[in-house]
Image (cartoon, rainbow, N blue to C red):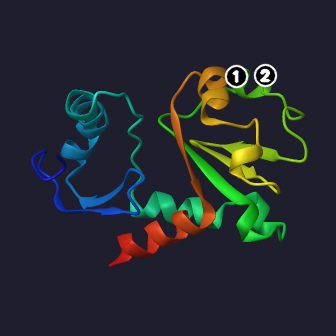
Amino acid sequence: MFSKAGCDDARTYIQSGNVIFCATPKIAARLPELMAGQIAKRFGFTAPVVLRTAEQIGAVIRNNPYLKAGVAEAELHVMFLARAPVARNIAELNPDRSPPDTFTVLGQEVYLRLPNGAGKTKLTAQYFDSKLATIGTQRNWRTVNRLFELMQG
């Protein structure tokens, strides 16, 4: 699908919706809507399509507040949002929704610290999507770093 849309060198990583490719900014700008439509048509379900450049992923890695605080990498996750939420919606998030889990919203990302793992948290994509009025997709820290490595070469 990505190749047909004009992307070069399209390849997937770990069969969880991660696609790495090269595209012009003009092509990349239309991909979220185009790919979401293609996924719905081909597979019969809706899925968020959220794009980040290699530079943006590098910034996500550099700016993780939990990593800077020395939290174990196995506890770290990032939710990539389609667009930055408004301050009013961020302020309405419940920081005590799922103790001991914590989160920080910075720009178009929600940084998550999930000591008991992603399977036991109430800080889900559905929660953030509904409260922040956007869509997002979550990845563990190992995957974020591996995607960045693959994007580099």
Within-10-Å neighbours for mark 2: few <14, some 14–19, many 20+ = few
| Residue 65 placement, left or right of 41 | right
Residue position for label 2 = 92
Report the residue at 65% width, 30% height from top: 128
Q: Quick one: label 1, few (<14), some, or many (20+) residues within 10 Å? A: few
Q: Residue at x 79, y 26 (%)?
A: 91
Q: Are marks 1 and 2 in contact (CB under 8 Å)?
A: yes
* Residue at 42% from the left image edge and 53% from the top image edge: 16
Q: Position of residue 145 (x, y in %)?
A: 54, 70
Q: CA distance from mark 1 to mark 2?
A: 5 Å
- SS state under label 1: helix
**Which SS class for mark 2?**
loop
Amino acid type, residue under disc 2 in the picture? Glu
Q: Which residue is mark 1?
A: 89
Residue positioned 13% across, 45% down in the render: 5
Q: Amino acid at mark 1?
A: Asn
In terms of depth relative to the viewer, which is nearer, 78 or 60?
78
Is 103 situated left or right of 24 in this image? Answer: right
